Amino acid sequence: MSQPQALIVFTGGYSGEAVISRKSAAMVMAQIDRRRFKPVLVHINPKGWLIEDVLTGEKTATNLEALVNDKRRFIGAFIMVHGTPGEDGKLQSMLDEAGMRYTTGDANCMALTFNKGQTNALLREEKIEVARSVELAHSEPWDAVKIANNVGIPCFVKPNETGSSIGISRAETVADLASAIALARSVSTSGVLVESMLEGREFTVGVVPNEQGQATVLPVTEITTERLFFDYEAKYQGASQEITPALIPESQRDALQAQALAVYRATRCKGMARVDMIWTEPGVASVIEVNGVPGFSEVSIIPQQAEKSGFSKETLISNIIDSTLLLS
C-alpha cells in the first residue's frame, strides 16, 4: 500500500462559530482513514494561523505560503471552518490564489450561500420557494410598519451573514423589530434580512458525494423544539429533537430530497452541504438556509443522517476528499 497522503484540516475562524468548528474538525481528525490520509490540524485565529504537531499537540505559527511549500506536500485542505473565513469564500479565495484544492464549493459558491439575501434571490430565479423578505443594509434606515406590511408579524430577523442561528430572533410584534434588528446588526455588518414566518414543520437534508463522486441525498431529518425556533441553544445545548429518518410519507420525503439536491446544484455546492426547509401546506418546501460547511461534530445532523443511510464517518470523509481533491 502506498504511503498516506498529507492533508490539511482547517479549523477555528473569526466568528462565534469557532467553538463548533473545533468540534467538527476533531471529528474529521478522529474518523479519517489513516491508511490513506495523514491529516494535520491548522487553527485559523484572529491573531494568525497555528499548525498543531500531530504527536505533541504543540502549536506553532504558520501561514499559507509555508503550508504550500511544506515538504509533506499536502494534497489539499479539508475545510471545517464554520462562519468566516471558511464559509464565506474568503479562505477559498486565498487557497485558489495559492493553487491549493479544498473540500467545499468555490469562493463564489461560498460567498453566495453565506449571504442569505443573495441566496434567496438566486433560489427565486430558479423557481425554488423561499420566504418573503426585506433586506436592509447595515446602516440603512427602516420603517417598522412597512416591514410588517411586507413580511407580516411574527417574522424572523437574521444577520445576512452568520451561521449556527447566531444573532437570529423572532419578532412577535412590530415593536420587537427594533431590538431584533439591533441584535442582528451587532453580530454582522453585512446587513439584515427580515423574513416572513413560515407555518409548518422543519426538515433538513444533507447532500454528500458517493463513492463515484456524484452528489447524493441523505435521509430527511425533522427538527422539533419547544423553543420559538431552532436557535443556538436548540442546536447545541439539547433543546431540540432531531428525528432521522423523519416519519413522513415517501412522497414528502422524495420532494424534500429533490428540493435539497436542486438547491445544491443551483448554488454549485461541492463536498458536503445541508439544506434546511419548512414544509407548509399544501405541500410546499420553502428553503430557509443553505449550509456550505455544515456541522460535523458528534451531535451534528449530517453524521446522524449518514449513519442511517449506511455511510460510516470514515467512508463519508473519504468520499468528500476523493470527490473534491483527487477525482476532479
Image (cartoon, rainbow, N blue to C red):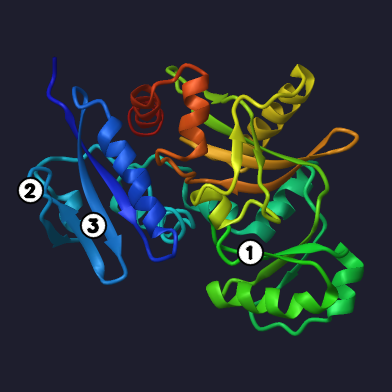
Residue at image coords 71%, 33%: 259
Residue 56: give its label.
2
Percent position (x, y) of residue 266? 65, 39
Classify mark 1: residues with Cα within 10 Å, few (<14), some (14-19) or many (20+): many
Q: Say left or right for 60 vs 250.
A: left
- Residue denoted by label 1: 168
Classify mark 2: residues with Cα within 10 Å, few (<14), some (14-19) or many (20+): few
- Judge whether 50 appears above or below 323 on screen: below
Q: Amino acid at mark 3?
A: Leu
Q: Quadrant of the N terminus?
A: top left
- Residue denoted by label 3: 64
Q: Quadrant of the C terminus?
A: top left
Q: Say left or right for 182 vs 48.
A: right
How far separated are the C-alphas under marks 3 and 2? 22 Å
Disc 2 is placed on an element classified as: loop
Of callouts 3 and 2, the N-terminal one: 2
Classify mark 3: residues with Cα within 10 Å, few (<14), some (14-19) or many (20+): few
Q: Amino acid at mark 2?
A: Thr
State the count of labels: 3
